[in-house]
Amino acid sequence: MEHVLVTGGAGFVGSHIVDELIEHGYEVTVLDNLDEQVHDGEPDYLNEEADYVWGDIRDQELITKLLRDVDAVSHQASKVGVGQSMYEIEEYVDVNVTGTARMLDIIANEEIELDRFVIASSMSAYGEGEYYCSDCDEPRYPGLRDVEQFEAQEWELFCDDCGSQLDPVPTTESKPLDSDSIYAITKKNQEEMCLSVGRAYDIPVVALRYFNIYGERQALDNPYTGVCAIFSSRIKNNRRPLIFEDGDQTRDFIHVSDIARANRFALTEADAVGRAINIGTGDPTSITELAEELIRRYGEEDELSPKVTNKFRSGDIRHCYADVSLAEDLLGFEAQVSLETGLERLVSWGLDSNATDNTDEAYDEMEEKGLIRD
């Protein structure tokens, strides 16, 4: 039996990983700081078979002690939120980058031997997804849309060479990383630091680039979390989900249980070592379609409809969904939970969960700081 340290293991993703590992015979120690933005004390879903340590990823003495006692690390601890990261810059960099750097520093200098180190990366590191120009018959990797394009409400991407509208295609791991928010930059830095130190010290590191995660236990009170939770909170409070742009932007939504499985595979599959791997479904879904599905499943279709604002957020991308072939080849991983089934599970859990809708306050804060514009 291997002993795994799961950082952030009391959180949404981390707790599902803990359950998955314990179910398959692993011994698990959890480190979590119970961030007040996410937790109101210890959550009631904690797995009783895990050992819990309440502390901070930046605590050098604590991390050193924990690392000496485990065989592997699943590093999930992170400050999450694209919009919030653009004005809580120091906090995001300190938790995500400095916290990870401290752990790696301990591993390198205290001669910690690990069988595997799995780092939670993010599709946000890509910036825009991958595209194809049919007229030029070539792939394209566009940068961020400029303010003038947003203000003209021209939402799609166009070819720099011929001016034709680009077609979104599955995003491969070889696409250049063009991170477009502080959060994305910190995830890119986490990934690159871990892979670099892994190569230098012969530590078997695997980076998993998560696409848009949803599911049970996602904090419904946190307006900076995933869109499924944000929309759920709005709907449960009889408020219309707010949608930026025209609502036709697409994402790749993957259920948290599939993320947990991918992490378990990453602990043992030798071919994955030293690689960054997409973890998604390969299926794009529009934000409007997602909102409508959630409204219907919560039984509010006669009362609510999505509110398409035609406003834009600084740094938002248009389309990004995963090419999943590398995950299949290197991890033997394929998502098992369809969006239909996953949303049913989310809503079943959400109906019995308390949800304070803090979206308006977060929206006003971002608008005040110039991150949301007409």
Image: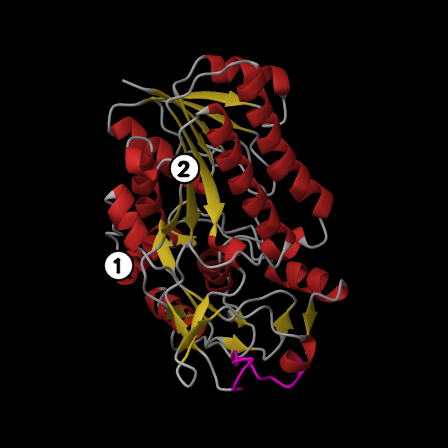
Residues in magenta, as a range: 151-163
* Amino acid residing under circle 1: Ser
Quadrant showing the N terminus: top left
State which tag comes first along the sequence, 2 or 1: 2
Q: In this rendering, would 225 be left or right of 280? A: right
Of helix, strand and loop, which mostly describes the magenta segment?
loop
Pointer 1 residue: 338
Residue name at image x 54 percent, y 50 percent: 221
Q: Nearer the viewer, residue 257 or 171?
A: 171
Residue 208: x %, y % from top left: 41, 44
Left or right relative to 144: residue 208? left
Residue labelled with disc 2: 274
> Residue 29 lies in magenta, yes or no?
no
User: Where residue 45 sits: x, y (%)?
Assistant: 39, 34
Q: Determine the image quadrant of residue 357.
A: bottom right
Most foreground residue, 335 or 171: 171
- Relative to 86, is 6 above or below? above
Alpha carbon distance from label 2 to label 1? 29 Å
Q: Disc 2 residue type?
A: Gly
Q: Is residue 371 left or right of residue 159?
A: right
Which of the two discs, 2 and 1, sits closer to the camera?
Answer: 2
In this picture, is 14 found above or below 163? Answer: above
